[in-house]
Image (cartoon, grey):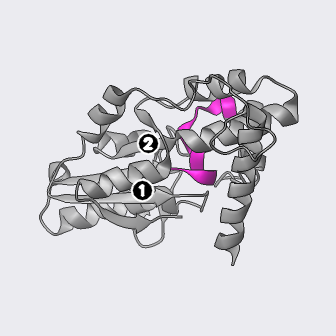
Amino acid sequence: MKHSTNRRDFLGKMITGAAILGMPSFAPMGVQEASGQEGMRLSTDSVENWLNKIKGKHRIVLDVTRPHEIFPFAWAKVFLLTNQATGATEKDCCAVVVLRHDAIPYAMKNELWEKYKFGEMFKADDPKTMTPATRNPFWEPKPGDFSVPGIGNVEIGINELQASGVLFCVCNMAITVYSAIMAQKMSLDPQMVKKEWIDGLLPGVQLVPSGMWAIGRAQERNCGYCFAG
C-alpha cells in the first residue's frame, strides 16, 4: 500500500510539474501549450556510449526509487563481493544502478542538498545523524562511515562503487518534474533550477531519458533485475 501511494503521489507530481513547464505530453487539457522546450531531449551519443559500458558475464540492474538506508548502494557491493567469492573478477561483473523517482538526489552534489533541502524534500536521512540530510551521504564518504554487523566496514560510496566498475544513471523525467515543483515552491525559474540540478550531477553519473528507459535498455543487454528500494 505504501509503495502504491508513493507511485500515485509521483504521478500527481509529474502532472503538476508538467503543467508548470507547459509540457504537452503530461499536462492536463486546458494547460497544454506549445512550449518549444528542448529539455526532454538528450544526446543519443552520450546515452548510447554509456550503455555500451555494460559488459561482463554477470550483469544486473538495480532499480532505486527512494531513499532506503544503505540498501540502494549496499546491494551493488553485495553483488560484486559474492560474485568474487564464487570465482568471478570485477571485470566479469557489471552492476547498473538506476536512480529514479525519489532517489534522484543521490545523483547530485552536496551543494544542491544544502541549498534545496533535499533531505526534507525526499525524506532522505543522514545515516550519521538520522536527521534530514544536508549533504549527499554516499558521495566520498569517510573510511568507517558504513559498517555492517558481521562484515565490518564496507565501501559503498558512489565514488567507491564507480571505482569497482559500477555504473550509475539518473532519471531526467524525475529531475524535470521535481525541479519544477521546487522552483514553484521557491518562486524561481523552473528552467534555471533544472539546469542547476543537471549541472550539479556527480562525476560519472549519466543523465538518461527516464529511469524506466534505462531499466529497459539494461535488460535488453542481458542484465538481471533487482528492486533496490
Asked whether 100 falls inside the magenta stretch, the response is yes
Give the answer, above or below, for where 67 lies relative to 206. Answer: below
Q: Which residue occupies the extreme bottom position in the image? A: 1
Question: Residue 154 has which mark?
Answer: 1
Residue 9 bears which disc, if any? none
Quadrant of the rendering where the C terminus is positioned: bottom right
Q: Secondary structure at mark 2?
A: strand
* CB contact under 8 Å: marks 1 and 2: no
Q: Mark 1 is on which residue type? A: Val
Left/right of residue 69 with respect to residue 178 in the rendered view: left
Amino acid at dot 2:
Cys
Residue 181 lies, in percent from the top left, at 77, 40
136 inside magenta stretch: no
Tell me if 166 is positioned left or right of 26 in this view.
left
Q: Is residue 48 above or below residue 220?
A: above
Front tag of 1 and 2: 2
Identify the mark nearer the N-term, 1 or 2.
1
Q: Which residues are magenta?
A: 99-112
**Please, is residue 97 above or below residue 113 in the view?**
below
Distance between the alpha carbons at the discs numbered 1 and 2: 22 Å
Mark 2 highlights which residue?
169
Residue 82 appearing in the image:
yes
Please rate how many residues cluster around mark 2, counting C-alpha atoms within 10 Å: few if below 14, some from 14 to 19, many from 20: many
Residue 11: give x, y in percent of width and height. Answer: 68, 56
Image quadrant where one finds the N terminus? bottom right
Q: Residue at x 40, y 67 (%)?
A: 226
Q: Position of residue 55 (x, y in %)?
A: 19, 47
Q: Residues within 10 Å of mark 1 (few under 14, many from 20)?
A: some
Q: Is residue 25 left or right of residue 160?
A: right
Residue appearing at x 23%, y 39% in the figure: 52
Q: Camera-side residue: 60 or 141?
A: 60
Query: Residue 76, position in %: x, y?
Result: 37, 57
